[in-house]
Image (cartoon, rainbow, N blue to C red):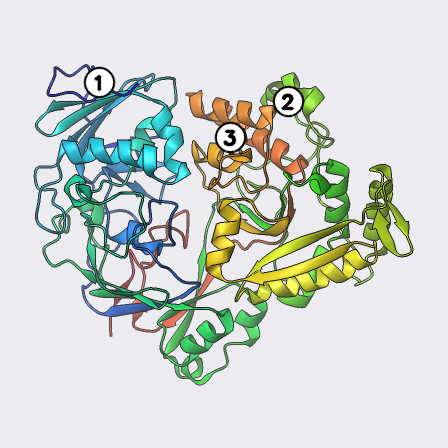
Amino acid sequence: MVLMSGVSAPVAVAQPAHGIAMYGPPALPPDFVALPHANPEAPKGGRIVFAELGGFDSLNPYILRGRAPWALGALTVESLMGRNYSEPFGLYGVLAESVETDAARSFVAFTLRPEARFSDGSPVTVEDVLWSIETLGKLGQPRYRTVWTKIATMEQTGPRSLHITFTEPDREMPLLLGLRPILQKAQFANRAFDASSMEPIIGSGPYVVIGAEAGRHLSLARNPDWWGADLPFYRGQHNFDEIRYDFYADAGVAFEAFRAGLVSTWREASPARWQAGYDFAAVQSGEVVKSEIPHARPSGIDGFVFNTRRAIFADWRVREALIQAFNFEFVNQVLNGGRLPRIASFFSNSELGMRPGPAEGAVAELLAPYDDSLLPGAMEGYSLPVSDGSEANRRGIRRAMALLEEAGWRVEDGVLQDGSGAPFAFEILLQQGSAETQAIANIYVEALRRLGVAVQLTTVDSAQYTERLQLYDFDMTRRSLSLSLSPGNEQWLYWGSVGVTQPGTRNWAGIESAAAEAMIRKLLTTADREDFVAAVRALDRVLTSGRYFIPFWFSDVSRIAHRRELRFPEHLPVYGDWIGFQPEVWWHED
């Protein structure tokens, strides 16, 4: 039970600090001047215009009801601490001037900055902080609930200080509380927090909403009176006077808007188009610049996800068969000129990824208690099939058919059927405007027809797509999920068994695995970096061998085409083009 009381004597025994990290001390000293990947001399001014796909009908990004632009949370609302993306997981004071915790991380305490203000000029108070944590935990999106359930008590300990204790050991909890968005309690005195609304959130961030038309555009202006402009953490950040997001239903139309100069910047997903599709006049004249931004973060997962809540996908042999039938090499050649490597596992491209071959050492020890429940490949090693690149993919199709027959399916009159004669048929759900996914699905459907599988492609608008995903009302769809160098409590939201039935989580696959949950608990509680890496590698093995996804490709660089007057620092964060990069550290310079 969470208790919120009046001012009481603090319990903390640790010393206040300017920052905190997941392991060891934070990378930056107390007197740091700016984040390593920010340019403290960057000029202020100018405008940047983004093209977004889909639409929105709400300006509250913290609830399930409605669809809100993601930028609202990043640019108009502040948290107690801010993340430095030049280290795996280090936070530094923003609304809070200091943070305290103990070696066991059984509690966290924050002291607010006296100058912290909301955009209407009112001070950010301890009451706002306590209310925000509780309200988000009870009424906000599911990603906030795990943290809320681990809070034992919350109390105000001084005019600007608060103390939070936890129900169980969890090294990440102090950091997650530091990243909680802090909202203004008074704004919701006569308004239901969890009701969708086009009324902007009153935040304490650098930007305020100056224009919004549902489904069409969102305009943000830099607040000239922003209280945090002189913080070292923000020096060189938030440089544009205006940030605008225009929404398009179709990616092709959005790209044409960029070519025409209506959009300032474009992230290119296709390496083939990056090579051959940028010969228009603005590129040739130098008005548009092509920049490649490298990174060292995990590949994450991007591919078709099986909804294992559906009986047709419950058998791992069926999922493996459909993975074998997916001709990655051919699809990659058609769409990317064969230039992009395949995602090998969820944390591949980083030290956190599973290693080839059998599990060894600490990874094997962690998995051993769950050996009976693990799928083939978890202990022995698992790798995705490699085709000869031809469209026929005969070897993959043969393997797929053998697995399907083993699982009880047979082809009769060209139709794959189970023992009762029911056909093997399912739907791939697509979002309107997703041309690349449509192209991938078309090739895949043709391959599945050779197995006697009937697949229906269903395209819906963004509103229907979001609603169906929240209710897990789909058989298969595309899932793209970025993963960081510091996985933590968000892993419960992605892979935790509560998401099998609870709507709105990110466990689209319906994963229910005691082994996966054990690895998540381990990575959250260990104080040793080597044990942490072993736990993530073990989790990677469980997820990859679970055959929940048909992985596509990833890139270790981001490709951004942009107007030449848009600049970014030479020193890049380890995460590259990710959260906190564009537009945060970019600027306008003629």
How far apart are the two marked residues, 1 and 3, measured between alpha carbons? 35 Å
Q: Where is residue 588 in the image (x, y as percent from the top left)?
A: 25, 68
Left or right of 150 in this view: 497: right
Tag in front: 1 or 3: 3
Among all residues in the image, which is located at the extreme right?
A: 413
In this figure, which residue is indicated by the disc labeled 3?
A: 498
In this figure, which residue is indicated by the disc labeled 2?
A: 364
Q: In which quarter of the image is residue 437?
A: bottom right
- Residue 252, compared with residue 414, is above or below; it is below
Determine the secondary structure under disc 1: loop
Give whichever of 468, 528 is nearer the camera.
Answer: 468
**Residue type indicated by callout 3:** Val
Q: How crowded is mark 3: few (under 14 residues within 10 Å), some or many (20 or more)?
A: some
Determine the secondary structure under disc 2: helix
**Residue type indicated by callout 2:** Ala
Q: Do the residues labelled 2 and 1 touch (CB within 8 Å)?
A: no
Q: Do the residues labelled 1 and 3 touch (CB within 8 Å)?
A: no
Q: Residues within 10 Å of mark 1 (few under 14, many from 20)?
A: few
Q: Position of residue 410 (x, y in %)?
A: 88, 45
Tag in front: 2 or 3: 3
- Residue 326, compared with residue 539, is above or below; it is below
Task: State which quarter of the image contains the N terminus.
Answer: top left
Q: Counting residues from the N terminus, which is met first, the one under dot 2 or under dot 1?
A: 1
Q: Position of residue 92 (x, y in %)?
A: 25, 37
Left or right of 334 in this view: 279: left
In this figure, which residue is indicated by the disc labeled 1?
A: 14
Determine the secondary structure under disc 3: helix
Give whichever of 360, 136 is nearer the camera.
Answer: 136
Task: State which quarter of the image contains the C terminus.
Answer: bottom left
Q: Are marks 2 and 3 in contact (CB under 8 Å)?
A: no
